[in-house]
């Protein structure tokens, strides 16, 4: 296990890939960690707010979960574990949460989250025991590429519909993604690697000049930062094991498996490394982290597409920066002041950054198709990809009693079932 904590220091040429077992000099690695914290922060805070959980605790558990995932995968899989949106619908259904303030039935949700983590862990142990071939047969490159692309496309409506309440905010989103794109294309060296962070800072300065200076929109308000305590413990909560809630929430494990699988395939495609041998460990790491988070009062966690989008843009896949990001998250979890500073970033600026990140995820799915030379003259590949993309992008939703399967879930299962069904048709045709 000593190799976990040893990375080969590199000083790569501009645009060169930094592998999972390599790292930049520590100051640059720490800066990359900050960038990954910013990438995950908005969603990791938003998900618990929508379910009535404590956001500071969710940030803290995301850091602990990421460190746990790092240990279980032997430091070989670059991923950040943040709050999963897959739980929102079932948690609201199980608890009857009204959408304001703390969730009065939080314990019932936590019991279900722990059950989900246990199922997820069991799937991981099965994969470790019998291998990945059965998963690869169910999810070949045309399916995994579609699922990865759908994760980005399904999230596209979040910044565009929910993070630009005014016309000014919509224009500011445009300014933000132009800033990020400008950093990506026109800068060189380490500044280019920090395109998300630098672009966000530049856009925030522009926003402050236009609002605080010229009064064109909602000004940046730092009073929350000044009033927040430097140190404060998050609110822990105990789980309650209710059979109905557990049956409702546990099936989310299948969606988490699909997300994690898609993310592993994306990272494998981007790094040129076969991540399949790590699949079982990655599932176990995510499952155990979900159980631990639920036992303390936190949300279920998943490997974060936002951070994979950042890796796609920077070509840095070092697991060292995720250790740094996790340690920063621990600090944030215990410091309301740091949390307030990041929450003071204008919504429109976060929205503009999200547009870039979600788009990069979608393109990572297309890269899986290209790298695996998926043949779209084959109607089976063509139809599976076409239907999957529209199911996910359009957020096609199915209800099974109290259980709701949203766009990413229906697209994932739809892709798997279509691939299997059309294969049998082909064989008998």
Image: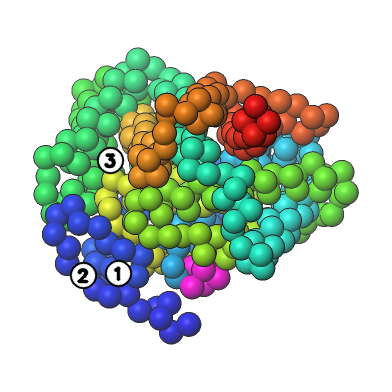
**Inter-mark Cα distance, 3 to 1:** 26 Å
Q: Specify whether 18 is left or right of 142.
A: left
Q: Is residue 281 above or below residue 297?
A: below
Residue 160: which quarter of the image? top left
Q: Specify whether 45 is left or right of 249.
A: left
Q: Quadrant of the C terminus?
A: top right
User: Which numbered disc covers residue 22?
Assistant: 1
Could you say which is closer to the camera, residue 134 or residue 123? 134
For the residues carrying marks 3 and 1, which lies nearer the camera in this image? 1
Q: Specify whether 65 is left or right of 52.
A: left
**Highlighted range, magenta:** 68-74
Residue 238: which quarter of the image? bottom right
Element type at marker 3?
helix
Q: Is residue 45 above or below residue 393?
A: below
Upstream in the sequence, badge 3 or badge 2?
A: 2
Element type at marker 2?
loop
Q: Residues within 10 Å of mark 2 (few under 14, many from 20)?
A: few
Element type at marker 1?
strand
Where is mark 2, residue-wise? Answer: 10
Q: Are marks 1 and 2 in contact (CB under 8 Å)?
A: yes
User: Which numbered disc covers residue 200?
Assistant: 3
Most extreme residue toward the right is: 243
Q: Position of residue 65 (x, y in %)?
A: 55, 62
Q: Residue at x 22, y 52 (%)?
A: 193
Q: Is residue 293 above or below residue 218?
A: below
For the residues carrying marks 3 and 2, which lies nearer the camera in this image? 2
Judge whether residue 72 is colored magenta. Answer: yes
Upstream in the sequence, badge 1 or badge 2?
A: 2
Q: Position of residue 155 (x, y in %)?
A: 48, 32
Judge whether residue 389 is colored magenta. Answer: no
Most extreme residue toward the bottom is: 2
């Amino acid at each position: 296990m000593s190799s976990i904590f040893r990375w080969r220091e590199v000083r790569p040429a501009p645009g060169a890939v930094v592998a999972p077992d390599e790292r930049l000099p520590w100051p640059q690695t720490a800066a990359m960690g900050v960038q990954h914290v910013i990438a995950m922060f908005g969603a990791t805070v938003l998900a618990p707010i929508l379910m009535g959980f404590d956001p500071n605790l969710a940030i803290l558990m995301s850091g602990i979960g990421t460190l746990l995932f790092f240990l279980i995968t032997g430091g070989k899989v670059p991923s950040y574990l943040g709050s999963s949106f897959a739980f929102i619908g079932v948690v609201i259904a199980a608890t009857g949460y009204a959408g304001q303030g703390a969730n009065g039935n939080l314990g019932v949700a936590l019991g279900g989250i722990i059950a989900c983590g246990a199922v997820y862990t069991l799937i991981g142990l099965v994969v470790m025991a019998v291998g990945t071939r059965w998963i690869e047969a169910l999810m070949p490159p045309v399916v995994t590429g579609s699922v990865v692309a759908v994760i980005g496309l399904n999230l596209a409506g979040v910044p565009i519909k929910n993070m630009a309440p005014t016309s000014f905010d919509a224009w500011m989103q445009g300014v933000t993604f132009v800033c990020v794109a400008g950093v990506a294309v026109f800068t060189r060296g380490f500044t280019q690697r920090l395109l998300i962070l630098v672009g966000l800072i530049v856009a925030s300065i522009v926003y402050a000049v236009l609002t605080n200076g010229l009064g064109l929109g909602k000004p940046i308000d730092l009073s929350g930062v000044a009033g927040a305590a430097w140190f404060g413990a998050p609110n822990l909560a105990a789980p309650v094991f209710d059979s109905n809630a557990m049956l409702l929430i546990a099936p989310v494990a299948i969606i988490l498996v699909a997300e994690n699988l898609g993310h592993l395939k994306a990272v494998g495609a981007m790094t040129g490394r076969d991540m399949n041998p790590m699949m079982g460990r990655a599932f176990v790491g995510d499952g155990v982290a979900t159980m631990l988070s639920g036992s303390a009062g936190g949300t279920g966690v998943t490997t974060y597409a936002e951070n994979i989008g950042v890796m796609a843009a920077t070509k840095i896949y070092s697991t060292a920066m995720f250790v740094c990001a996790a340690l920063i998250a621990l600090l944030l979890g215990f410091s309301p002041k740091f949390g307030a500073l990041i929450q003071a970033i204008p919504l429109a600026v976060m929205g503009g950054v999200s547009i870039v990140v979600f788009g990069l995820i979608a393109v990572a799915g297309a890269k899986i198709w290209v790298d695996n030379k998926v043949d779209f003259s084959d109607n089976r590949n063509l139809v599976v990809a076409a239907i999957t993309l529209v199911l996910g992008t359009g957020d096609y939703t199915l209800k099974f009693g109290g259980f709701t399967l949203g766009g990413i879930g229906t697209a994932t299962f739809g892709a798997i079932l279509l691939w299997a069904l059309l294969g049998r048709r082909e064989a008998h045709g």
